[in-house]
Image (cartoon, rainbow, N blue to C red):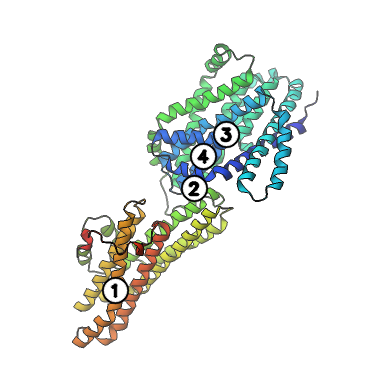
Amino acid sequence: MEVNWQLALAGLGMFLFGMSLIESAIKTAAGAHFKTMLKKVVVTTPKSLATGVISAAVLQSSTLVSLMTLAFVGAGMMSLLGGVGVVFGANFGSVATSWIVTLLGFKFSVSSIATPMIGVSGLALLLTGSKKKLRAFFTLTMGFGLLFYGLDLLKDSMESLANAVDISQYHSYGAFAYVAIGFVLTIVLNSSAASMAIFLAAIGAGVIDFNIAAALTIGANVGTTGTILLLAVVGSSDTKRLAAAHVMFNVGTAVLIFLLLTPIGYLIMDIFGLKNDLVLALTIFHTIFNATGLIIFGFLTRRIALFLSKRFAKNEAKITRHIGSISPQMAEVGAEALKNEAGHLLEEALNFSLNMLNLSPREIFLRKRKITAVVYSHPHIIEYDVDSNYERLKKIEAAMLEYSTKIGERSPEDETLLNRSLAAAREATYAAKLFKDIKRNLDEFAASDDDFMLDHYNQARIRVARLVKYLHLSMRSDGENEKSLSAKLFNILTEIQNEDRNTLNTMTKAIKSGDIEQSVSPTFISINRAVVNASKSLVECAQLLYLSIKIEDVGDEKIESSEDEEE
C-alpha cells in the first residue's frame, strides 16, 4: 500500500495553522492579562513556577511563554530568578496540549464536528467585522476545528504508513537515534506540540512502538530549546542566562529520563496496564518527563539562578540597556522595553547634569550627606568628557526612535506608552543639551575669585542637585511616597523658577554696589534660564515615565522638610 504523503502534509499544515490561530486568539483576548501576570506574579519561586504552568497551559504554547519571559528578563522587567521559575513551569504546562489531543482527538471522535466548526467560524469571522472579542472567540473555534481536522488527516495518513512500513527493521538503530530524530523534527517544525501530535498519531496507528515513541518524545523536549537559543545569541547577558536555564532543564531531564527509560516503560506498560492503549501511555510518559524536570529543577531554581548570574559577564558596554536585547517584532513587550530604555536615558541625563555642575553622581545618590556639604566640599572643576558623553545620550535617543519604527502591530495602550517614552527621551536629551551649553560659563564661575559669582554658582548647584536626587528617587519608588516626592519636586522647581525671576533685581543691586561688573550680567541670565528650562524638562521626563500625578497638583500641600532641604 502506498503512503499518502500529501494527506500527511495537509494534516500537519492544518494542525500547525490551527495551533497558530489558537495562540493568536488567546493572545488577543488575554495577552495583556498574561503580560501583567508574568511581570507581577513572580515574587516567589512557587508563584513563578505556577505562573509558568498556568500560562503555558492556557496559551497552549510553552515556547510562547518562554519567549515572552526571555523578553521580559532581557528588558529588565522581570528578575532572572522569576524568569527561570516561569520557564521551568512552562515546560510542565506544555503537557496540556498532549492531553487535549489525546482525550479529544483519540478518546472521543470530534472529527465529525471539526468541519462544521471550521465552516461556522469562517462565516462568523467574515460577519463580525472589527468586534475584537467576537473575532477572538471565532478565531479560537476555527483554530480548534483546524487542529482536530488536521489531526484526523494525520491519523489517516499514519494508517497507510503502518501498512507500508515494517518498523522492526529500524530497532537496530537504538533509542538515541530516535532522540535525534525527535530533536530535529521539533527544530524544523518549531513546535513540540506538532511533534507530539505526529508521535501520537503514529503510535496510535501502530507505525511505531512505545519505546521508539518515548525516545522521540525525549528528543522533542530537547528540541524546544532551539528557538530560545537562537534569540539569546544576540541578546543581553540575562537572556543568555535564561536560555541556559531552559537548556539545563530540558537536557538534564532528558538525560535522566533516557537512563530510566526501561523502568519508566515497565511502570507505564505493566504496572499501569496500558499495553493496549499506547496513545494514553505516551501522553503519560510525556507528563512524567516534564513533572520529573519540574520537581528536580523546581527545588534548584534559586541555586541555578544564582549560579547563572555569575556567568555570561558583559565583555563590552552597550549604548542601550534594554531595547538591544529585545526584538522589536515582539510587540507584547516592545513598548515596555522602550519605556525602560527611556528610564535609562533619564538616569544617564541626571548623571550628565550633575557632572556639568562639577558634582559626582555617586556623592549625590549614594552618600548620606547633606547636599550643601557635598557641594561646598567639591569646589573644583572635575575632569569629564562632555562631548562624548553627550553624543552617547543622543545615540540612545536615536536608537529608541529607530526601534520604535520597527515595533509591529500594537494595542492602543502600547501606542500611548511608546509615544510617552519617546517624548520623555526628547525631554531628557534636551535637558542635557542645555547644561552642556552653559558648561563653559559654569566653569568660569567655579574658577572665579568673586564671592558673589561663587555664591550664585553654588546655590544653583545645590538646587539642581536636590532636584536630581528626588528625580532619582522617583525612578525607584514604585509608586510609594509618590505624593510626597511630587510635592518636593514642585517646591524645588518653584525655588529654581523664583531664583530666575529674582536674578535681574539681584544683579542690578550687585552692579550698583560694585560686587560685579555689568558685563557679566548676560552670563548670569543665560545660566539661570538654562537651569530653569533644563529642570523643567527633567521633571517632565519623570512625569511621563514614573509619576501618575502632576507635581503642581500637590505643590501647595505642606510637607515635612527633609535633611537636604534644611539648608
* Marked residue nearer the N-terminal end (1 or 3): 3
Q: How busy is the neighbourhood of tag 3: few (under 14 within 10 Å), some, or many (20 plus)?
A: many
Label 1 – label 2 distance at C-alpha? 48 Å
Q: Quadrant of residue 230?
A: top right
Relative to 489, 171 lies left or right: right
Q: Which residue is mark 1?
A: 498
Position in image of residue 316 (x %, y %):
42, 52
Q: Which residue is mark 2?
A: 235
Q: Which residue is mark 4?
A: 66
* Marked residue nearer the N-terminal end (2 or 3): 3
Task: Please state the total of marks drawn on the protein image.
Answer: 4
Which label sits in the foreground, 1 or 3? 1
**Answer yes or no: do the residues labelled 4 and 1 have beta carbons within 8 Å?**
no
Position in image of residue 1 (x %, y %):
81, 23
* Marked residue nearer the N-terminal end (3 or 4): 4
**Answer yes or no: do the residues labelled 1 and 3 have beta carbons within 8 Å?**
no
Q: Amino acid at mark 3?
A: Gly
Q: Amino acid at mark 2?
A: Gly
Q: Amino acid at mark 4?
A: Ser
Label 1 – label 3 distance at C-alpha? 65 Å
Position in image of residue 148 (x %, y %):
68, 31
Assign the C terminus to one quadrant of the image: bottom left
Q: Amino acid at mark 1?
A: Asn
Which label sits in the foreground, 4 or 2? 4
Q: Which residue is mark 3?
A: 223
Q: How busy is the neighbourhood of tag 2: few (under 14 within 10 Å), some, or many (20 plus)?
A: many
Label 3 – label 4 distance at C-alpha? 14 Å
Asked whether the viewer can see residue 48, the reply is yes
Residue at the image point whose x is 22% and y is 63% from the top: 565
Label 4 – label 2 distance at C-alpha? 14 Å
Q: In the structure shown, which secondary structural element does the residue marked by tag 3 occupy?
A: helix
